[in-house]
Image: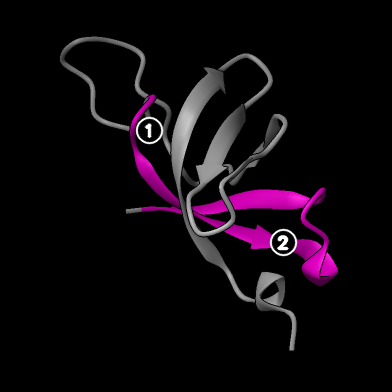
């Protein structure tokens, strides 16, 4: 079975908070995604006293139908 069917841990390398998207490095594949959608229930950090997703955060990426070009950030760890 293709391992991309399973969710993968990754590290956020870039954020576009206006579009609610992120680029994520998937270390196990040595692959960086293009900008992919972030689940709406995950908060993006907006200020120094705020908590939330930021560059360097560890996230879970789920690949829709195992397609590495169709990932979604589904959890923030």
Question: Which residue sits furthest front?
Answer: 30
Structural distance between the alpha carbons of marks 2 and 1: 19 Å
Q: Residues within 10 Å of mark 2 (few under 14, many from 20)?
A: some
In this rendering, is residue 77 above or below 5?
above
Instruction: Read off the residue under disc 2.
Output: 63
- Residue at x 50%, y 46% (from the top left corner): 41
Q: Residues within 10 Å of mark 1 (few under 14, many from 20)?
A: many
Q: What SS does tag 1 mark? A: loop
Residue 52 falls in which quadrant of the image? top left
The scheme the figure's colours follow is: one colour
Q: What SS does tag 2 mark? A: strand
Question: Which residue sits furthest bottom?
Answer: 1
Quarter of the image containing the N terminus? bottom right
Would you say 20 lies left or right of 45 here? right
On the image, the x and y values in percent for residue 48 come to 19, 10
On the image, the x and y values in percent for residue 42 come to 46, 42
- Whether residue 58 appears in magenta in the rendering, the answer is yes
Q: Earlier in the sequence, mark 2 or mark 1?
A: 1
Question: Which residue sits furthest left?
Answer: 49
Residue 50 falls in which quadrant of the image? top left
Would you say 62 lies left or right of 46 here? right
- Residue at x 35%, y 22% (from the top left corner): 45
On the image, the x and y values in percent for residue 54 come to 37, 26
In this rendering, is residue 26 above or below 66?
above
Would you say 45 lies left or right of 67 here? left
On the image, the x and y values in percent for residue 19 come to 69, 20
Q: How many numbered marks are there?
A: 2
Instruction: Read off the residue under disc 1.
Output: 53
For marks 2 and 1, give the one nearer the viewer. 2
Q: Which residues are magenta?
A: 55-76
- Whether residue 64 appears in magenta in the rendering, the answer is yes
In this rendering, is residue 44 above or below 72?
above
């Amino acid at each position: 079975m293709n391992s991309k069917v399973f969710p993968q841990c990754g590290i956020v390398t870039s954020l576009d908070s206006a579009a609610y998207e992120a680029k994520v490095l998937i270390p196990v594949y040595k692959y960086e995604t293009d900008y992919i959608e972030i689940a709406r229930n995950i908060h993006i950090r907006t200020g120094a006293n705020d908590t939330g997703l930021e560059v360097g955060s560890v996230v879970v990426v789920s690949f829709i139908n195992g397609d590495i070009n169709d990932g979604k950030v589904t959890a923030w760890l």
